[in-house]
Image: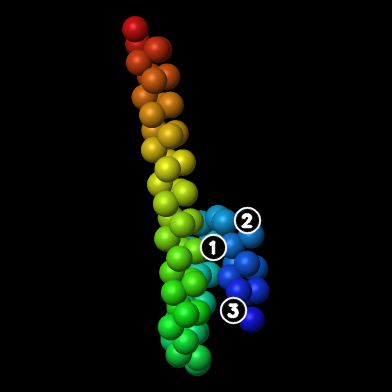
Amino acid sequence: MVQKRIDKATKPFTMNSISRLVALQADIARFGPSLEEVEACSKVLNEGLLQFRTEKEAVAKTDGKMLNYMFD
């Protein structure tokens, strides 16, 4: 059940997915305190945040190279 909610919140993974996962974690903690379910949400959330960080760093490196190229 929780896995379906995680999939629904994160397919595709966007910035809104982060708030949905945090809300889902809060619901689980409030209504169904299952450590495994909270850990599943945390794992997906951490993977998504790492993905965004990696993409952001890649864009920053590309933008920096473009600026260097433009001003050389």
At 54% from the left and 63% from the top, the residue drawn is 17
Q: Nearer the viewer, residue 57 or 67?
A: 57
Q: Which residue is mark 2?
A: 12
Please name the residue that numbered disc 1 is placed on. Answer: 17
**Rendered location of residue 19, percent (x, y):** 48, 67
Asked if one can make out residue 22 in the rendered structure from this viewpoint, the answer is: no
Rendered location of residue 58, percent (x, y): 43, 34
72 sits left or right of 7 in the view: left
Q: CA distance from mark 2 to mark 1?
A: 8 Å
Q: Is residue 9 left or right of residue 67?
A: right
| Residue designated by label 3 | 2
Where is residue 47? Give x, y as percent: 46, 57
Q: What number of labels is visible?
A: 3
Give amino acid for label 2: Pro
Disc 3 from disc 1: Cα separation? 15 Å
Say which amino acid is labelled 3.
Val
- The furthest residue to the bottom: 31
Image quadrant assignment for residue 65: top left
Q: Residues within 10 Å of mark 1 (few under 14, many from 20)?
A: many
SS state under label 2:
loop
Q: Are marks 2 and 1 in contact (CB under 8 Å)?
A: yes
Q: Nearer the viewer, mark 3 or mark 1?
A: 3
Measured along the vertical axis of the image, is residue 35 above or below residue 3? below
In the displayed structure image, the side of residue 9 where residue 55 appears, left or right: left
When the figure is inspected, residue 51 is found, relative to residue 7, above or below; the finding is: above
> In which quadrant of the rendered image does the N terminus lie?
bottom right
- Which mark lies nearer to you, 2 or 3? 3
Mark 3 or 1, nearer chain start: 3
Q: Position of residue 14 (x, y in %)?
A: 55, 55
> How crowded is the residue under tag 3: few (<14 C-alpha within 10 Å), some, or many (20+)?
some
Which part of the image, by quadrant, shows the C terminus? top left
